[in-house]
Image: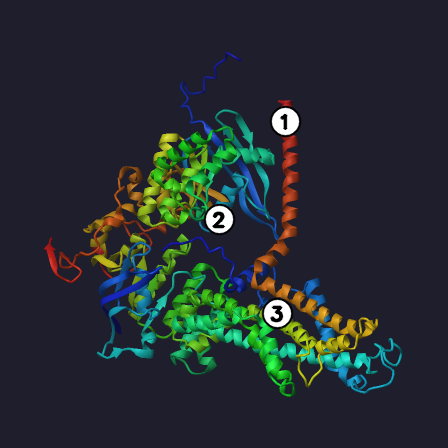
Amino acid sequence: MTLTVNPASPAVPPTPPPVVLTVQNLTVVYEVERPVTAVKNVSLELARGEILGLAGESGCGKTTLAYAINRLHKPPASIASGEITFHDKADGDLNLLTLGAEQLRMFRWDKLSMVFQGAMNALNPVTTVRAQLEDVLTTHRPEMKKAERRELAASVLQLVGVDRSRLASYAHELSGGMRQRVMIAMALLLEPQVMIMDEPTTALDVVVQREILREIVRLRDELNFAVIFITHDLPLLLEISDRIAIMLAGEIVEIDTATNIYRNPQHPYTKKLLGSFPSLTGERGSFIRSGVNNSAELS
Amino acid sequence: MTNLTPTTEPSIGDAPDQLAAVAGALGEKPRSALRAMLPTLTPWLVTGLTLIGLIALFGIVGPFFVQDPTVIRNIGLTAPSADHIMGTTQTGQDVFAQLAYATRGSLEIGLLVGVLATILSAFFGILGAYIGGFADEAFSLFSNVFLVIPGLPLVIVISGFVPPKQRGLWTIAVVLAITGWAASSRVLRAQTLSIRNRDYVNAARVSGERSFRVIAVEILPNLLPVLASQFVFAVIAAILAEAGLAFLGLGASNSSTLGTMLFYAQNGFALPLGAWWWFIPPGLIIALFGTGLSLINFSIDEIINPRLKNARLYRKRNKTALRNEAARLTSAARTGKTQRSAS
Amino acid sequence: MTSIEVTNLSKHFVLREGLKRNTLKAVDRVSFDLTPGRTVALVGESGSGKSTIARMLSRLEKPTSGQIKVTLDDGTQVGGSIYRRHVQMVFQDPFASLNPFHSIEHHIARPLVIHHRTKGREQTHERVLQMLERVNLTPAGDMAARRPHELSGGQRQRVAIARALAPGAQVLIADEPVSMLDVSIRLEVLNLMARLQREDNLAVLYITHDLATARHFSDEILVMFRGRIVERGPADDVILDPQHPYTKLLALAAPDPEQAGKVIATETTFDHKSFDNQSTFNHYTREWTSADGEVLERV
């Protein structure tokens, strides 16, 4: 330890929130005849308890990125270069790319869980919600007693706003919003530190979507897990995320706080995306609709 | 109404699109719709086509070159020789000549039944499903009834009922077609129901297309691979069923088929007498023909469900991708470890 | 010019569950007018009956009761086979609405031929190219020869629009025309529709679940809820000053970056399915009316 103090450093540096996940220069390539780089040199840091929005259009690589982070990508996709480090609360740093199959299995869901696109259709139609929740626990928490499993499943379900009487239900007996909540409960079950959500509300109606979003934000506040929220719906991200990354053709072209992205976008693509969503209560944006003259009422 | 998740059910309606995607991934030039529906030339397909081609050629051309199969000689049951390359029957008829005519007869029956059964199944399956409502219910019930009728016994009863003199090729073909179309019709109905509710069919209706054109131009092309596969299957089934019937002595009276050959071989005690040249050739031709058509059918299956094709195309590539990544990851781990130990 | 008058349109589906028979009123006594040069937006969640209205207007479905009256400028009524010359539809999913087996030319040429808009092959081909250019698909010759899978979603939807306009239709039913498209091209397609509407003085029914585009793209908004129109009025009035509790909820639930943080703030836990769908608020007359047209209350 050296006692010399660097005079240039600020007196009290603001303590940055501890980072839970670091992605460095990640490149994912689809090794087809002419290899396609789906994710190009992406670097990002995810702070504990942060909601990071990942916005982009279909084919921009956002889903590939999410899958690669969890090493769920399927061939022909392959990670060509980069590093993914998980900073575990208890065990310290984990290099995700060097985990073996068994370690990876233990890591997934336990530390980092995922809510997939169209996940509400991913529930098994022939077993009850309880059986599916408890199944996760028997796999990852084999030491748990049956009564404990039951209790935990019920309490997590209640946490996401589903009555515990629904434990005995089958998937088809639940509405779309309810099924999505069950999926979130399943992702929450092991109290992961990071949750990746890939278009979790796209197939839902706005009213239900709003309820789910509120639930996610509330749970985040309560349990302090970090969320990577992937969607093409930028206004939605602006409302719920702390920071937003804009992806275009495999690259993150801009990453900033939600307010900055909204008030002061830098990249032309960000501006274009923002302009694509006319505001509900505000101006028309890039809507051209002359010939009908009620523009006076608008301003 | 936002449902961005695509349906995962593979369906024939998606086939052209998916095939095009596969072609695109391979860097092939976009081809016409019909070309995209042609199967790729795999070894299996080549084997199948060769088998069918040779047998068909034999059936078509053979009878012009062989001896008269009906001539009776007093050299019963002689083994293959230069004069009779496949030997003779009990009554001294040339087996090779008989085989040529019999192959032609079986092919005729097969083709006839294939066409008839395909037309019947297309009519009841596609039309009923497209019209919907009462017509669908009625057609569906009708094909269900035919589906549960036990085929062979019915065929035996009908063939036995028709006096042998009138029991010609056509009678047998019609009987086989009537008992064989129902299963295909069910499949076609299901596919049509799925395609009928697609937006492009609705859009054609909104455009003002007449029902006939909607079926013929918008729906039918997308069903072609299914129809082709069903036709091939119907041909196999017909040749086998006819062989069975003829073996029981209920075959066509006015034409010789591979089945009638086997029937006469059985009656002439070919097996106990060890006259293998009499029953093996027709049996082998039936088996090879069935094999050939099945191999062709596998290739058609790849068109109906492009995932099979995808699977074949991507399996190799995926393996390479996996291997590359594994190699990269282990090397990264090794360097990571050395770095860690160094620091 | 063609206008449509819809009066008391209803569609009931009979659901059979064992021996029980239930009637689902998918659309229940709905009335509205479509007039040249105006866009009417029909908004609501999935299952509210808005697509059923589109299907009835495009004669894919027979109404249980009620009238659809199409009138030309000179007062003649349109019916029978020429109905389709006047009323055309753009479908939601551009990936499903073009037959993968046929070329783009086929899709636009067919309506031209069916409705005797052109004579002979050459004239038809020329008109197809003109139509493609009108929807900004250039080079038209190249586009005409392509097949659907070689086009992007936005391009496909342009083809669908060209096909709808090919018979010379004056009334356009657009059922969620942009909801399946990437966000950055949604506005392009909507702007294209607005331009064509201006040029041809079309009457447009814009069906959507997106309140923001409904507000900016249309003159009048009809809010549908469980088969009934529960609120109607000028676009801005309905969105900025909603009266029916369901409309209020919808407006509240729509993402709006102007009001970031709204997610957590609003408590919308009440069950919106319990709302009454029998009374309608009309912004033009400022009246609440019952399903039978009786005035309940004046505001």
**Residue that lies at the very extreme toward the left in this rendered image:** C298
Identify which residue, C248 or A7, lies in the foreground.
C248
Q: Is B289 left, or right, of B131 in this rendering?
A: right
Is circle 3 on the same chain as circle 1? yes
Q: Position of residue A179 (x, y in %)?
A: 39, 45
Element assignment for label 2: loop
Task: Name the residue at 88% across, 81% down.
Answer: B83
Task: Name the residue at 63% across, 63% down.
Answer: B298
Depth-wise, is mark 2 or mark 3 nearer the camera? 3
Q: Can residue A47 be seen here?
A: no
| Disc 2: which residue | A60
Q: Quadrant of residue C111?
A: bottom left
- Which amino acid type is marked by label 3? Phe
Q: Can residue A48 be seen here?
A: yes
Is circle 2 on the same chain as circle 3? no
Mark 1 Cα shell of 10 Å, populated few (<14), some (14-19), many (≥20):
few
- Which amino acid type is marked by label 2? Cys
| Disc 1: which residue | B339
Mark 3 Cα shell of 10 Å, populated few (<14), some (14-19), many (≥20):
many
Q: Is C225 left, or right, of A191 in this rendering?
A: left
| Disc 3: which residue | B233
Res. A228 mark: none
Q: Position of residue C31 (x, y in %)?
A: 22, 65
Identify which residue, B183 or C121, lies in the foreground.
B183
Q: Position of residue A35 (x, y in %)?
A: 60, 50
- Which amino acid type is marked by label 1? Gln
Separation (CA) of disc 3 from disc 1: 64 Å
